[in-house]
């Protein structure tokens, strides 16, 4: 399974903390993490293994959306900062629309991401 992680600048530390908190599950479930460039850079600096795309404003959101559309990514965690303005908002909206079109789980905050991971854990237990 491949999971994409993206975080606006004000949420990058929160994303890295979230990934660290759930490292054991992500690792044991054999989940590959792909990230936009700067989010991935922060995750790598924290010792996490991620595949990096371009940064969001330079096309990373679109690269991830393309992988969602191709069926290569099964979940997206996009920790958005709703209190800031983002010049690449059209790319963000496109990624969210692609997730909806292809019925791919999209978590935009840690609370929802927690629930998605719990669902994956239950599904994993059911398959064993």
Image: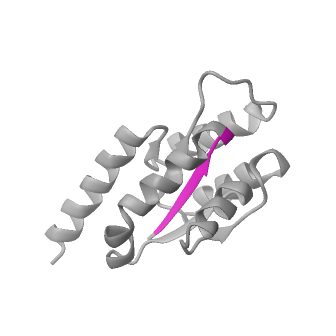
| Identity of the residue drawn at 73% across and 63% down | 53
User: Is 7 contained in the magenta span?
Assistant: yes
The segment highlighted magenta reads 2-9
Percent of width and height locating residue 15: 51, 50
Figure quadrant of the C terminus: bottom left
Q: Is residue 73 above or below residue 97?
A: below
Q: Is residue 85 above or below residue 4?
A: above
User: Is 127 contained in the magenta span?
Assistant: no
Q: Nearer the viewer, residue 70 or 95?
A: 95
| Identity of the residue drawn at 62% across and 21% down | 83
Q: Residue furthest right?
A: 58
Percent of width and height locating residue 105: 43, 48
Q: Nearer the viewer, residue 29 or 95?
A: 29
Percent of width and height locating residue 94: 68, 38
For the stretch drawn in magenta, the main secondary structure is strand
| Identity of the residue drawn at 44% across and 71% down | 1
């Amino acid at each position: 399974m491949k999971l994409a992680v993206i975080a606006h600048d004000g949420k990058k530390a929160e994303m890295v903390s979230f990934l660290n908190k759930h490292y054991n599950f992500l690792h044991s479930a054999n989940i590959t993490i792909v990230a936009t460039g700067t989010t991935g850079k922060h995750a790598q600096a924290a010792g996490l293994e991620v595949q990096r795309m371009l940064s969001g404003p330079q096309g990373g959101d679109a690269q991830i959306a393309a992988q969602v559309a191709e069926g290569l990514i099964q979940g997206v965690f996009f920790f958005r900062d709703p209190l800031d303005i983002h010049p690449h908002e059209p790319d963000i909206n496109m990624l969210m629309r692609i997730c909806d079109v292809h019925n791919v789980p999209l978590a935009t905050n840690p609370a929802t991401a927690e629930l998605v991971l719990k669902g994956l854990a239950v599904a994993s237990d059911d398959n064993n």
